[in-house]
Image: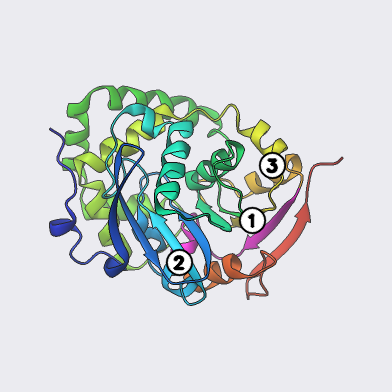
C-alpha cells in the first residue's frame, strides 16, 4: 500500500489550513481550500505541486473574491482511484465533478503550467464557462527535443513499477529539491522549499506525479486552442527554464483571443516568487495590470 500524506500529520502547518476542507466528488476524496467571498476564482497548480503553490496568492485574491484551490488528483492530499483520473481528460472531468459538488461556477480560471492545460480541457468539454482563462507559464505543447523524447517513456516506465516510486521518494532530500527548483529558473523562499521537500519525499505524491506525466496526451491541445472562445491571458516569465517563454507567443498565434503578458526577472514558479504581481494580474478586470516589470501585447489567430 502506497503511503499517502495525512492532513492530521503532514498538514499541521499547511498554508491557509483554516480554508481546507475534504470533499467526496467524482469518486475521489479531495483536499480543497476555499477562502473569501465574491466572484469565484479557480486556481489550478501544475505537475508535482499542490495547493501550497498558491499559498500567498490566495489570501490576496480572497479580499475581493471567493478563491477555490484544490489539490489535483494524485497530488498533495487528494488521492486518485485509477490511472484514468490522471489523464488530461480524466483530470478535467474530475475537477468538473468537484466544482459541481461544491456548487461553484468560477468566473476566472487560472492555471500554472499543466494546470493551465487542465483548465483548457475543462472549457473544451463545456465543464466550465469562465469569463477569462489565465495561464502562468502554461505547458500547452509537448517538451521538444531529446529531453521530451526521453522523459515521457521514462515516466511511463517508472509509473508501471510501483516499487520504484518508493525508491525515488527515499532518494529525495532537501538539497535535491533545491537543485530541482533552481532548475526552473525560480528562487522561492525557504518555506516553499520545505513544502516541496515534503511532497517529493512522499511515495503517494511521487506516484501521482509520475503517473500523470505518463498518462498525458497533448496531441489535441492545438485544436482546443483554435476552438477557444474564452479570452486567454498568457503570462510568460522570461527566466523560465522549464517552459520556454516563447511558447506563450506560439500559443497566442493559434488562439483567437489571446493576450501575452511578460514578467521580467521571474522563472517558472513566478506566482510563488512574486505573489503580489500574480494576484494583480489575475484580479484585474481586463486581465492585465499596470505592474512594475510587466509588459503586455495582444495577439491572436487571423480570421
Q: Is 128 colored magenta in this rendering?
A: no
Task: Identify which residue is drawn at 45% across, 64% down.
Answer: 67
Q: How far apart are the alpha carbons under marks 2 and 1?
A: 23 Å
Q: Nearer the viewer, mark 2 or mark 1?
A: 1
* Region of the chain picked out in magenta, as a range: 257-273
Q: How far apart are the alpha carbons under marks 2 and 3?
A: 29 Å
Query: How many discs mark residues in the rendered view?
Result: 3
Kindly indicate whether the residue at mark 1 contacts the one at mark 2 (C-beta within 8 angstroms).
no
Where is residue 91? Give x, y as percent: 43, 37
Q: Is residue 163 left or right of residue 242?
A: left
Residue 139 seen in render: no
Q: Which residue is mark 2?
A: 273
Residue 113 seen in render: yes
Q: Which residue is mark 1?
A: 132
Q: Is residue 141 left or right of residue 297?
A: left
Task: Identify which residue is drawn at 17% across, 34% down.
Answer: 167
- Along the line of sight, the residue nearer the viewer: 204 or 153: 204
Say what secondary structure mark 3 lies in.
loop
Marker disc for residue 10: none
Q: Quadrant of residue 236?
A: bottom right
Disc 3 crowd, CA 10 A, few/some/many (<14, 14-19, 20+):
some
Where is residue 24? Give x, y as percent: 29, 45
Say what secondary structure mark 2 lies in.
helix
Name which of mark 2 and mark 3 comes first in the sequence: 3
Where is residue 235? Give x, y as percent: 61, 57
Q: Nearer the viewer, mark 2 or mark 3?
A: 3
Say what secondary structure mark 1 lies in.
strand
Q: How far apart are the alpha carbons under marks 3 and 1?
A: 11 Å
Quarter placement of the C terminus: top right
Q: Which residue is mark 3?
A: 228
Task: Identify which residue is drawn at 53% across, 56% down.
Answer: 106
Amino acid at each position: 500500500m502506497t503511503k499517502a500524506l495525512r492532513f492530521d500529520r503532514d498538514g499541521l502547518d499547511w498554508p491557509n489550513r483554516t480554508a481546507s476542507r475534504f470533499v467526496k466528488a467524482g469518486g475521489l476524496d479531495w483536499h480543497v481550500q476555499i477562502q473569501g467571498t465574491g466572484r469565484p476564482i479557480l486556481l489550478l497548480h501544475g505537475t508535482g505541486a499542490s495547493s501550497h503553490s498558491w499559498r500567498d496568492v490566495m489570501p490576496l485574491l480572497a479580499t475581493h473574491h471567493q478563491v477555490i484551490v484544490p489539490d489535483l488528483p494524485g497530488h498533495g492530499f487528494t488521492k486518485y482511484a485509477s490511472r484514468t483520473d490522471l489523464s488530461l481528460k480524466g483530470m478535467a472531468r474530475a475537477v468538473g465533478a468537484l466544482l459541481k459538488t461544491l456548487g461553484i461556477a468560477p468566473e476566472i480560471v487560472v492555471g500554472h503550467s499543466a494546470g493551465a492545460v487542465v483548465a483548457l480541457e475543462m472549457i473544451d468539454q463545456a465543464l466550465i464557462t469562465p469569463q477569462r482563462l489565465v495561464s502562468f507559464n502554461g505547458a500547452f505543447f509537448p517538451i521538444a527535443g531529446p529531453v521530451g523524447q526521453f522523459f515521457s517513456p521514462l515516466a511511463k516506465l517508472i509509473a508501471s513499477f510501483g516499487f520504484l516510486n518508493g525508491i525515488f521518494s527515499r532518494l529525495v532530500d532537501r538539497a535535491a529539491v533545491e537543485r530541482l527548483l533552481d532548475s526552473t529558473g525560480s528562487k522561492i523562499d525557504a518555506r516553499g522549499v520545505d513544502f516541496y521537500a515534503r511532497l517529493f519525499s512522499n511515495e503517494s505524491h511521487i506516484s501521482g506525479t509520475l503517473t500523470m506525466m505518463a498518462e498525458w496526451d497533448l496531441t489535441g491541445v492545438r485544436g482546443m486552442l483554435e476552438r477557444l472562445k474564452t479570452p486567454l491571458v498568457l503570462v510568460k516569465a522570461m527566466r523560465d527554464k522549464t517552459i520556454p517563454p516563447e511558447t506563450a507567443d506560439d500559443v497566442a498565434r493559434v488562439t483567437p483571443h489571446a493576450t501575452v503578458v511578460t514578467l521580467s526577472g521571474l522563472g517558472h514558479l513566478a506566482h510563488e516568487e512574486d505573489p503580489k504581481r500574480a494576484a494583480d494580474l489575475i484580479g484585474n478586470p481586463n486581465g492585465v495590470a499596470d505592474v512594475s516589470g510587466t509588459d503586455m501585447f495582444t495577439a491572436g489567430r487571423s480570421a
